[in-house]
Image (cartoon, helix red, strand yellow):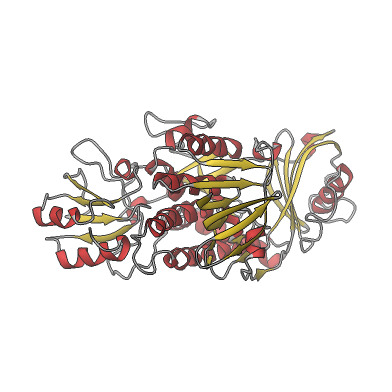
């Protein structure tokens, strides 16, 4: 048997991509090295992840946002299951910005309140929602079978996993930061070396009142305490301890004493005794990115394509963006109706986004270094982030509002995520994307525009309806991933929209 696609890795990115491909009726096999999908590190408190606007839009546009929200211990409002309207809205190196200061009027093509901007989610529940959807859609998941080696030809990829052989037309590596697919495939993975070892631990303390809750910088590093015993630490040791030795209670105690300055006369010099170590993991700020996300019939997505520190919670969101961008393009390639260069546009569009996130992570590391220069810089950032313009800028970057692909148009909406227009027929734009097809939204009901859309009727849905807020538009063409490909502010230029439709959806019927 030959599958359309074999995906290495049944994490969130691999599962989301599998759902995207099944939406297009492609045969998908997911191979996962771990036999058991459950892990204590995926649960509270370590399993919490911040999901930002592009990710939540993707779940919403595929009809999974309510399932995701219902599975999480989050506050919900009357309908959207959004985050509370007040309080912290995100952070940069631990410096929070508040909802009260964010001025959404500075985002002229963003409709506030039309979708959730961010949500705190449990990693195990994210995977549970996606695995349930994948299973319902007919995705085959084989656990305990990690990809070991593969060979590709002009027509297929032969894969060995767990002593078994599999054939696929395409192989996608979603197998994490130590990706076997990336290594066997010979992808270049340049980047920057780590400056620190980060620790996420759950401990018991004999005298917890001695250690102040919250995040604190010291001359030796950083620690953050969430009572009663969730502790994060950053030890600027060049990443020397990460995955080199077992994490013991004694080692965690030593690192904590070093960071708070016990016995060395620096820092807060608080002698806190740890009595038990319940859970522990380490991480670093190593930041690397594949130079391309495609080599022949092998592609990369998620951490297999890019790694960086978890500061700011951007990594999982970056991976979901990869899957949303890749899924419909790979499906079109498999169907045979993809225009030339469509699949290569995946790497062309996502590589710059990955590079921006890596630099965003590096900037936070620069702010966290245990030096007087970094503390001076921190004070300036705190002042800026506490202003209306500053909070708005950081929200735009952290939430992903600023995401825009260069699609060759000067119109500021082209290349951005489409606003969730509330249509007069009672539906919203996002709901119209659940089938995974493109969408031509015609506010004025132009007969020539409908006739043109009918030429791509198998790939583009035509919808005519006015909206409560048009943003000055008369029509727009939206890709299956929700990205605006073309807009018209007056009468539609049929030649231009036909050219754009052919660019993204291939030749008409």
Q: Position of residue 187 (x, y in %)?
A: 61, 68
> Can residue 377 be seen at all in this image of the molecule?
no
Q: Position of residue 450 (x, y in %)?
A: 14, 52
Q: Is residue 253 shown left or right of residue 437?
A: right
* Residue for point 61% across, 55% down: 93
Q: Is residue 56 shown left or right of residue 92?
A: left
Residue projecting furthest to the front: 1
* Residue 397 sits above or below residue 373 on the image: above
The quadrant the C terminus occupies is bottom left
Q: Position of residue 71 (x, y in %)?
A: 52, 30
Q: Is residue 210 shown left or right of residue 454?
A: right
Q: Position of residue 146 (x, y in %)?
A: 67, 50
- Res 150 → quadrant: bottom right
- Res 142 → quadrant: top right
Q: Is residue 459 shown left or right of residue 264?
A: left
* Residue for point 46% across, 32% down: 67
> Can residue 432 be seen at all in this image of the molecule?
yes
* Residue 57 sits above or below residue 325 on the image: above
* Residue 211 sits above or below residue 321 on the image: above
- Res 465 → quadrant: top left
Is residue 141 or residue 367 the one in the foreground? 141
Residue projecting furthest to the left: 447
Q: How many marks?
A: 0
């Amino acid at each position: 048997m030959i599958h359309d696609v074999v995906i290495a890795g049944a994490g969130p990115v691999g599962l989301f991509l599998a759902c995207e491909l099944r939406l297009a009726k492609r045969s998908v096999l997911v191979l996962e090295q771990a036999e058991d999908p459950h892990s204590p590190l995926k649960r509270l408190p370590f399993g919490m992840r911040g999901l930002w606007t592009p990710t939540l839009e993707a779940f919403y546009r595929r009809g999974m946002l309510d399932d995701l929200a219902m599975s999480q211990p989050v506050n919900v409002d009357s309908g959207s299951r959004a985050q509370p309207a007040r309080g912290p809205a995100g952070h940069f190196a631990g410096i929070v910005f508040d909802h009260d200061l964010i001025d959404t009027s500075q985002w002229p093509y963003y409709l506030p309140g039309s979708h959730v901007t961010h949500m705190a989610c449990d990693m195990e529940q994210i995977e549970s929602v996606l695995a349930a959807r994948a299973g319902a859609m007919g995705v085959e998941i084989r656990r305990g079978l990690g990809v070991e080696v593969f060979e590709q030809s002009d027509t297929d990829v032969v894969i060995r996993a767990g002593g078994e052989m599999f054939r696929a037309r395409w192989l996608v590596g979603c197998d994490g930061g130590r990706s076997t697919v990336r290594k066997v495939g010979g992808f270049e993975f340049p980047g920057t070396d780590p400056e620190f070892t980060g620790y996420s631990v759950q401990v018991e303390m004999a005298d917890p009142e001695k250690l102040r809750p919250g995040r604190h910088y010291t001359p030796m590093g950083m620690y953050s305490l969430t009572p009663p015993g969730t502790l994060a630490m950053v030890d600027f040791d060049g990443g020397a301890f990460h995955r080199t030795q077992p994490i013991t209670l004694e080692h965690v105690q030593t690192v904590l004493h070093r960071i708070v300055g016990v016995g060395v006369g620096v820092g807060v010099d608080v002698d806190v005794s740890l009595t038990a170590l319940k859970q522990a993991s380490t991480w670093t700020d190593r930041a690397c990115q594949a130079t391309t996300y495609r080599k022949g019939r092998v592609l990369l997505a998620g951490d297999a394509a890019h790694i960086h520190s978890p500061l700011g919670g951007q990594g999982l969101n970056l991976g979901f963006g990869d899957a949303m961008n890749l899924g419909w393009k790979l499906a079109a390639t498999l169907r045979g109706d993809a225009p030339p260069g469509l699949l290569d546009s995946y790497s062309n569009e996502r590589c710059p986004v990955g590079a921006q996130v890596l630099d965003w992570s590096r900037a936070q590391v620069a702010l966290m270094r245990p030096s007087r220069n970094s503390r001076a810089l921190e004070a300036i950032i705190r002042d800026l982030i506490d202003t209306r313009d500053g909070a708005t800028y950081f929200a735009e970057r952290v939430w992903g509002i600023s995401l825009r692909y260069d699609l060759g148009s000067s119109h500021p909406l082209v290349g951005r995520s489409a606003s969730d227009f509330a249509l007069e027929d009672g539906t919203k734009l996002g709901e119209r994307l659940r089938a995974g097809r493109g969408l031509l939204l015609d506010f004025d009901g132009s007969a020539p525009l409908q006739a043109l859309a009918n030429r791509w009727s198998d790939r583009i849905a035509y919808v005519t309806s006015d909206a409560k807020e048009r943003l000055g538009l008369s029509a727009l063409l939206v890709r299956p991933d929700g990205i605006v490909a073309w807009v018209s502010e007056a009468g539609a230029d049929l030649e231009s929209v036909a050219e754009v439709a052919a660019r993204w959806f291939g030749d008409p019927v």
